[in-house]
Amino acid sequence: MLLQAVLLLLLRCLASTLGQYELCKSLVSTDEGSVWEHYACQPKAASMKDHMRIRVDPPGITCGNPPERFCTLENPYLCSDECDASNPDLAHPPQLMQDRERNGLITYWQTVTWRRHPEPLLANISMSWNKSLELTDDILITFEYGRPTIMVLDKSMDYGRSWQPFQFYADDCLDAFNMPPKRVRDLSPANITRVICTEQYSRWVGSKNEKNVKFEVRARFVVFAGVRLENMDNLYTRMESMKGLRDFFTFTNLRLRLLRPALGGTYVQRDNLLKYFYAISNIEVPARCKCNLHASQCLPIDGNLQCQCEHNTTGQDCQRCKKGFKAKSWKAGSYLPAPNGTPNTCTIAGSPSGSNCECYGHSNRCSYIDYLNIVTCVSCKHNTRGQNCQHCRVGYFRNASAELDDESVCIECNCNQMGSIHDRCNTTGFCYCKEGATGARCDDCLPGYYWKQGCYPNVCDEEMLLCQNGGTCYQSQKCICPPEFKGVLCQHSRCEAGKDCSGASLPHLSTATLLLCTLLTYLQATLTPH
């Protein structure tokens, strides 16, 4: 018991030394013994520079291939500096934007000069992490030889498939982007997520006096948490209650669009274009892994950051429940109530907390499908089917007047096999009929059709398809013709021109005529000499 008490004390001391939401669980003592108590948790903030993958566009924008000279804005006619990609001492590749500079030596990536003016000098710097991240402090970009006159910071939340502007930068916002200039301090709690254009970091003050361009995160936090961020509970409460606030600081990729280089506070001097270029020595992105408040650690695994998930969750962002736990029970953790939040732990499949196995009372058994990571109902009753027994079986349709948990929620279509294409019906119970058939169950015929184990087009009728030459229509199926006529509608005479019709008329000879013919034949045979 003494050892257990000491262990509990140590855990509580550890919890008190950790920052807010940095502990996922703690061992607490109850009347029934020690149990784990779970909390909403998130990883510590860190510099994401070491995990950043950088790509620059367009191809050939990096200087040095071929080698070229360049000047500086302070010494525009002393063009003795050189960029040469084949010489390690003179090369300025993209990876120098994220290296750890040692011995006070500043290293930087640099573009080609603006020698093709007036064609714009454009460069894109894309940063990716293959992971959802949340900003925790200001993004800081350090430029050498002057900050750009015009640039845009974009972000993506879907790994670079789509982009949206994060902030615009220009020495004249109205001229560059048709936007009035603003600072973050001008924003209020109601519009803190507004995308603004700022002139604060683009006007010329000398390349050595001010090198940094910021995307201000801390100033936005201050609006809710106070100047010294002493009221973080209020910030976290706003993260939960204010739509779009948390997403505003979330990203998977960032992109710098450099649209016009530093000009030295004047217009472009066409007689010396070698002093216009971009150069970046450092990019700092303070952030934490987004783990949906289900992890306190985030580690690089196989080259990618991975949340170390708790609360029975899994996935790179702890975005789903582990195998054997209810997929539909997943929910992001919550910062509320302060100070420990709500973990929203995934529940075990088939546990009482998910009554009726989430099958609307049509099944009490569930099965976990590993490769889909879903829990699905098994052996749905009452003619239902689907992951949650929420659909009707083939051959049944939804009873619109019944609730999903009603045993009579599905009604049989009862389609006529002869008149319907198959035994399925639409959502209103009407079967899919063959040509000529009609009715909810396809057991009747449209006008112009007759029923004979299915619907067939009329051969004859009393309106349009009249039997001719004295013929009569029998049940719309055939014409019964007089003996001297034939055809579907009795339209042809049996005695056609040039043919002997005696055979056709024999059946109509009178009895007297037949007797006379017989007598004449007998007399002829008697009188004929032998």
Image (spheres, rainbow, N blue to C red):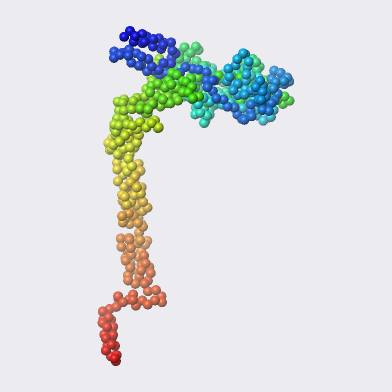
Q: Position of residue 198 (x, y in %)?
A: 58, 21
Left or right of 524: which side holds 65? right
**Is residue 387 shown above or below 423?**
above
Quadrant where the N terminus is found in the figure:
top left
Q: Nearer the viewer, residue 191 or 279?
A: 279
Residue 262 seen in the figure: no
Q: Position of residue 216 (x, y in %)?
A: 54, 18
- Quarter the C terminus occupies: bottom left
Q: Residue at x 34, y 10 (%)?
A: 4
Q: Residue at x 31, y 34 (%)?
A: 378
Q: Residue at x 33, y 37 (%)?
A: 385
Give coordinates of residue 54: x percent, y percent: 57, 25
Residue 521 seen from this side: yes
Does 8 appear above or below 297? above
Q: Residue furthest bottom?
A: 529
* Quadrant housing residue 455: bottom left
Position of 445 compared to 191: left or right?
left
Q: Residue at x 61, y 19 (%)?
A: 281
Relative placement, left or right, of 42 versus 509 is right
Vertical arrangement, residue 498 with respect to residue 31, above or below? below
Residue 70: which quarter of the image?
top right
What x and y, as percent, mark residue 452? 31, 56
238 or 29: nearer the eye?
A: 29
Based on the displayed image, in which of its 4 quarters is residue 268 positioned? top right
